[in-house]
Amino acid sequence: MNGLPLAGITVVSIEQAVAAPFATRQLADLGARVIKIERDTGDFARGYDTSVRGLASYFVWLNRGKESVVLDLKSDSGQSALKKLVSRADVFVQNLAPGAVERLGLGPAEARELNPRLIHTSISGYGRGGSYENKKAYDLLIQCEAGFLSVTGTPEAPAKAGISIADIAAGMYAYSGILTAIIQRSITGAGSTLEISMLEALGEWMAQPYFYAEYGGTQQPRSGAQHATIAPYGPFPTADGTVFFGIQNEREWRAFCETVLHAPDVAANDLFLSNTLRVTNRPALHRQIESVFRGLSSEQILARLDSAGIANAALRDMRGFAEHPQLAERNRWQNVETSAGAIRSLIPPVTTADFEYRMGKVPALGEDTDRVLDELSRD
């Protein structure tokens, strides 16, 4: 078993909420030392809820393996300590309001002059420049601006994602960007300036509906749990519940008609000869499928789908996910320590035999302040 790939890398982060903490938590899992700078009231994600034995679900998800250091960044001593930490760091991450990091004297130019090997990483709503630079940006609002809500929901009403998808997208690009910059620095010896906007991160994920509308001439419709451009694909009622399945190609469509519907002639129906036609004639298609499914149980239909090689799924709530047999059989859960005791957490999704992730303790507010400041004073 080798050491963790980011052992010896130090990250200093002035971070709040989701995007930046998600990026730095993944660095911590890979062995980086992550020093999280907080105000005396803490990252406000600490107060989002109290569902995890009195701790916030957002905070325990995003902050394991970090050191919490409380600094008053309005004071000379706090700013001095921060600059000293940044001068020794490999990576500096911040998602403060536009202009705030410059007022601290740690904008990209100043920070990299202080530390030429520094990877300076900024996450914002809309990026530097442009008329939206200073506009406040929260996850739901970015979902709106990126067009996500225009394709999500039902024809009658848009729906936001049930998770912080814009923040997560930005955090993932910050994480991968930092890893890329570390590799580049190993070649050039020089640091980098990275900038990630939530709008552009989620915009990348919106590329398919953009291309569909821009070059197809029509807006991809909101289609609920159905796929907007593939049919049949989504939920279908049965005699005792609902099943989900998706058809990807014409071979699967023929197998579905023969093995699941027990009606091979349906595959040759002029209304359903291609995916485009099936989408156009979706109401008739669904009536055909539901006429068979109404007389069968979910278990019977899922068995037929498996027999035909058609992808299908059970609709699980969070309890069902927590008890998912595949995750249990693959030993994908591990306990993480917190001030409220151990909590069961999912192991990061990249599986390797070369190392085990460091899923460290979730820090209490300021618990590492004295030790880290003592380190600075000794040097």
Image (cartoon, rainbow, N blue to C red):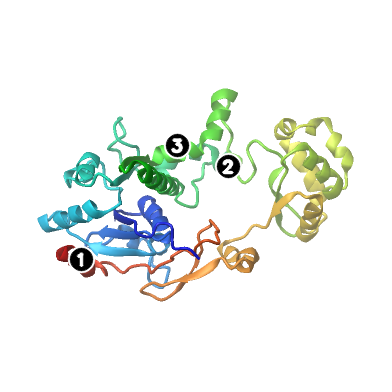
Q: Are the residues tagged 1 and 3 within 8 Å (C-beta)? A: no
Per the image, the residue denoted by label 3 is 146
Residue found at the very far bottom of the displayed protein: 341
Element class at badge 3: loop
> Upstream in the sequence, badge 2 or badge 1?
2
Dot 1 crowding, Cα within 10 Å, few <14, some 14–19, many 20+? few
Marks 2 and 3, how far apart at CA: 18 Å
Q: Which residue shows up at 85% across the image and 49% down it?
A: 259
Q: Is residue 2 above or below residue 216?
A: below
Place of residue 233 in the rendered image (x, y in percent of width and height, measured from the top left)? 69, 44
Pick whichever, 174 or 145, lies toward us: 174
Q: CA distance from mark 2 to mark 1?
A: 56 Å
Identify residue for label 2.
154
On the image, the x and y values in percent for residue 145 come to 42, 36
- Check disc 1 and report the residue beneath it: 375
Residue 297 makes an appearance in the image = yes
Q: Is residue 311 left or right of residue 59?
A: right
Splitting the image into 4 quarters, where does residue 8 fall? bottom left
Within 10 Å of the Cα at label 2, are there few (<14), some (14-19), or many (20+) other Cα atoms?
A: some
Q: Compare residues 277 and 183 and report the one nearer the observer.
A: 183
Q: CA distance from mark 1 to mark 3?
A: 44 Å
Q: Which mark is residue 61?
A: none
| Location of residue 287 in the rendering, given as x and y in whole percent from the top left corner | 77, 42
Q: Residue pushed farthest left?
A: 76
User: Considering the image in quadrants, where does the C terminus appear?
Assistant: bottom left
